[in-house]
Amino acid sequence: MIKLPLYHVDAFTSRLFAGNPAAVVPLDDWLPDAVLQSIAAENNVSETAFFIARGEEFELRWFTPKREVDLCGHATLASAHVLWEDGHLAESAQACFDTRSGRLTADRRGEWIEMDFPAKVAAPAEPPPELLPALGLAHAGFVGRNAFDYLVETDSEESVRALTPNHSRLRTLPVRGVIVTARSSRGEFDFVSRFFAPGSGVDEDPVTGSAHTALGPYWAAKLGVSDLTGFQASARGGVVRVGVRGERVLLGGQAITVMTGQLLY
C-alpha cells in the first residue's frame, strides 16, 4: 500500500469554508493517468492538483472529477500555498511550475499569493443558440470566446447573482465553461462574475482563477485600468486581484488549509 500526503485547501479566501476548495497531492513520481483521475473523482472537489519536484521547479497537473484540464488558477494557488506551508520551499522563494499551459510562477506578497498566468482574451463571438436560453438571459451586452470558455456580460451585478442556469443545456456546449460577468455595484470591487462548467464535471465553480485571465483583459480594456479587483459571486464567494500586463495576467489570492491527511493507494 502506498501512502500519499493529501491537503484540502480553500483558495481565494482568508477564512475557512469559503473560496474554492482544492485537493493537493504531492508525488515522488507520476502515477498512471487513470489512477490520478480516480483520485480526483474520489476527492470530488472541482480540482485536484498533483505536483512532483524537478530540481528547484515543480511539474503540476490539474484534474476535475471527470478529466484533466489545461489551466486552473485556484488549484495552482493551493499548490503554491502547500509548498510554502509544508516547507517544500522557503517563504522567500518563488514557486515555479511546469504545466500544460507553460511555465507558471507564484510569489508570496505578505498574506497574498500572486500568480503569473497567460492572458486568455475572449474575442467577440456569435453565441450558439443554446447559450443565452441556458443561462436564462434574454440578451447580453457582450458575448466572446477564448480557447477555453464563453464570456458573457450582463447588465447588472444583480442579474449575475440571480442566475439559475440550466446545467443540462450548458453541458451540450463544446467549451470548458461559461463565464458570466457584470460591473460591480459595490465600490470595493470592479466587477463580479460566476462560472459554470457542467461539461467539465463542475456545475458551478466557486472561484475560478483561470476565468480571470479572460475577465482581467476584458474589464481592463472596458474600464481603462490595468489593476482590478473581482468578486466571484458564488455561494461560497471569493476575491481575486487582477493585474493585466500585456500578454500576462497577475492573479492575487489568499489561501487557507482546511484538512491534512493521507491517501492510501
Image: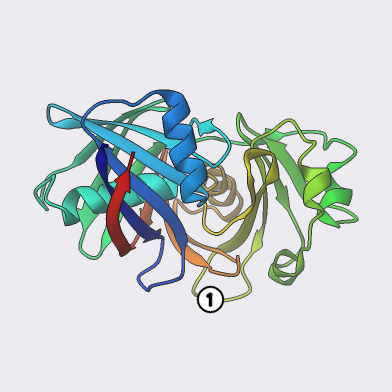
Q: Secondary structure at mark 1?
A: loop
| Image quadrant assignment for residue 11 | bottom left
Q: Amino acid at mark 1?
A: Gly
Q: Residue furthest front?
A: 1
Quarter of the image where the C terminus is located: top left
Residue at screen point 28% across, 59% down: 260
The correct choice, above or below, for 227 with respect to 13 in the image is above
Residue 129 x %, y %: 90, 38
Quarter of the image where the N terminus is located: top left
Residue at screen point 74% across, 30% down: 174
The residue that mark 1 highlights is: 187
The answer to whether residue 225 is seen in the rendering is yes
Give the colour scheme of this rendering.
rainbow
Depth check: give the residue in front, 116 or 165.
165
Residue 4 x %, y %: 26, 42
The correct choice, above or below, for 104 with respect to 17 in the image is above
Residue at screen point 82% across, 34% down: 126
Depth check: give the residue in front, 216 or 200.
200
Residue 183 x %, y %: 64, 63
Q: Is residue 229 left or right of residue 125?
A: left
The correct choice, above or below, for 235 with respect to 64 in the image is below
Q: Is residue 141 left or right of residue 47?
A: right
Q: Is residue 245 left or right of residue 113?
A: right
Mark 1 Cα shell of 10 Å, populated few (<14), some (14-19), many (≥20)? few
